[in-house]
Image (tube, rainbow, N blue to C red):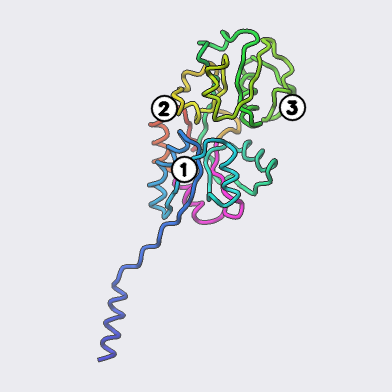
Amino acid sequence: MLRSLTLAVLLALAGAPARAQAPQVVRIGVTPGPHAQIVEAVKPIAAKRGLDLRIIEFSDYVVPNEALSAGELEVNSFQNQPFLDNQKVDRGYKLDSVALTVNFPLGIYSRRHKSFDSVPNGGTVAIQNDPTNGGRSLLLLQDKGVIKLKAGVGFKPSVADIVENPRRLKFIEVDAAQTPRSLDDVDAAAINTNFATPAGLKPSDAILKEEPKGPYVNVLAVRSADRDKPWVTALVESYRSAETKAFIETTFGGAVLPSW
């Protein structure tokens, strides 16, 4: 009787479905606008790979790396490689990029002028106050022949590196997230697309626009100790999927460019 009961229990256990493994929670930091929208689209794709993405929005470019380094996030998606490299040098973060994501061509916008040629001599131009994005804006202005920078400045020139400024433009440095608001006070402002879009600006509105080239593709960043963990691979595959690419191309119409 006991033997029969034991056999019945074993058979029942063998026929029972395996208990589903709980999804792994992954807190991902983003900036509002396209980065947040894209990760929302990635979320159901990642769920099929066993990840529960918890999206946390930050309004600036500094706190997401601080939160990641402190263990308040597992990953962030908001920055390009030069910005990450600069933060690692300045703040000692042990963070690594694990995948290329999207590129946001930088634009110079104006509410006062239809073209940059209309900006008067001595006009005011707002640029971002962090070295990577501010430098990127100055490089754009150099590429368009507006200013000339000192040779060998790399990807992070500052206003002090301007050696020719024939129109005597005045550069005002503000937080990147505040550049759309500065449009009421300046002749023109350099605005990253992920801040321009929530402010109702379209890349086609830009009076100068960066070519989608160089090192400014954005990245997924994690703590160095986590870079080889299985959930990182699952997240990268989810982000760089055909479904995500189709979402980006359909939603943003060329304002955001997938890197794959």
What distance separates the C-alpha of mark 2 from that of mark 3? 35 Å
Say which residue label 1 marks.
240
Residue 152: which disc? 3
Magenta run includes residue 225: yes
Tell me the kind of residue under disc 3: Gly
Q: Residue at x 64, y 49 (%)?
A: 94
* Outermost residue to the front: 185
Q: Residues within 10 Å of mark 3 (few under 14, many from 20)?
A: few
Q: Secondary structure at mark 3?
A: loop
What distance separates the C-alpha of mark 2 from that of mark 1? 18 Å
Q: Quadrant of the N terminus?
A: bottom left
Q: Secondary structure at mark 1?
A: loop
Q: Position of residue 235 (x, y in %)?
A: 47, 49
Q: Residue at x 45, y 56 (%)?
A: 24
Say which residue label 2 marks.
253
Q: Residues within 10 Å of mark 2 (few under 14, many from 20)?
A: few
Residue 53 in view of the camera: yes
Q: Taking 60 as reference, is 167 above or below it?
A: above
Per the rendered image, the range of residues in magenta is 218-239
Magenta run includes residue 95: no
Q: Position of residue 182 (x, y in %)?
A: 55, 21
Tell me the kind of residue under disc 2: Gly
